[in-house]
Amino acid sequence: MKYIKLFEEHSLNSLNAQKADLDGLKDIGIISPTEYTDKIKDINRQIKSMLTTGSMNTMYSKKWFDDIRTVPEFKWLVDVVDSPEYSNLVSKGVALSSSFTQLMNHTLVFSKNPERRVESDYAIGFFGATKTVRRIVPKTGNRDMDMIIKIFKSPTEADFFKSAMSYIADTIDFTTNYFSSKRAVKAELLKQETVAEFKKVMVEFIKKKMPGADDSQIRKLSDHLHALIGWNLAEIKPATKALKTWLTTDKTVNLSIYSYAPLDGELQQLLLNDPRLIVHNRAQRSLT
């Protein structure tokens, strides 16, 4: 048979009714919170057994989704999966990988490698109860923190899932495994390009100032100069411009560094006693 009957409908209804009864008993104090939690967990285990072992198909496969289309508990999920927003999101290379408990809580988790998501892969989580989207980090320690990406004010849960999936598909970069925003990835790429240009200009500057330096000396001086100038783009950009100007014109340029200790011999030879290079130490005073 194409459709595998997962359970008797009255059995699921009975279990859901038991959960509702437990909610009432907890509210009026007849059962303790601990007893309530234990009984709810037991009922959820029974529901999970019905919804997963009754099908011959792998959870989240197309045939599994076909199996659950007549299951009232999963109507909300079928509506999500049938939406163009869902199709667009999974076309980015992610797959639904919620645990059963997450699914019952209307939490949809998407990752690139569902089999090893928890320990090693980042994921995107859509939390229907709070209408919040989070970037979920691999669980490697006790202080792992999932980052809120956006909180939505959608009127219904269905609207939330569709709006959130559309937003994530448009704003997240899926070419890496970290699910960073496209803006962050673009900024990181710009930083890498800027640093690469800076290093190239530094090497040209060192070679011109110290033509006898070998590759090992050049690498050492380049690392030292980089550390003196700084690692932020706000420090690297003006330094690159200054060194370029020094290399290509006869103009005098200003170069800012940051050092509490005196410069060693090679750095002094590189940076000092040059009438066209005015070095300013932000930690002390001008060195020229």
Image: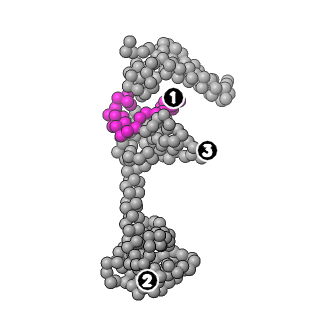
Inspect the image, locate mark 3, and give the three-letter code of the amino acid beneath it: Asn
* Image point (44%, 76%), residue name: 213
Q: Tell me the SS state at disc 3.
A: loop
Instruction: Give residue 238's position: percent from left, percent from top.
Output: 40, 72
Residue 9 is left or right of residue 196, and the answer is right
* Image point (57%, 77%), residue name: 261
Between 185 and 17, the residue placed more toward the observer is 185
Residue 132 in sight from this viewpoint: no
Between 154 and 241, the residue placed more toward the observer is 241
Decide: few, some or many residues near mark 3? Use Cα within 10 Å; few <14, some 14-19, many ≥20: few
Q: Tell me the SS state at disc 1.
A: helix
Q: Which residue is identified by label 2?
A: 278
Inspect the image, locate mark 2, and give the three-letter code of the amino acid beneath it: Ile
Which label sits in the foreground, 2 or 1? 2
Q: Which residue is identified by label 1?
A: 100
Which label sits in the foreground, 2 or 3? 2
Q: Earlier in the sequence, mark 2 or mark 3?
A: 3
Residue 272 in sight from this viewpoint: yes
Find out whether residue 93 is within the magenta segment. yes
178 in relation to 191, above or below? above
Q: Which residue is identified by label 3?
A: 142
Instruction: Give residue 241's position: percent from left, percent from top.
Output: 36, 73
Q: Which of marks 1 and 3 is nearer the N terminus?
A: 1
Inspect the image, locate mark 1, and give the three-letter code of the amino acid beneath it: Phe
Between 96 and 193, the residue placed more toward the observer is 193
Residues rendered magenta in the picture = 78-106
Decide: few, some or many residues near mark 1? Use Cα within 10 Å; few <14, some 14-19, many ≥20: some
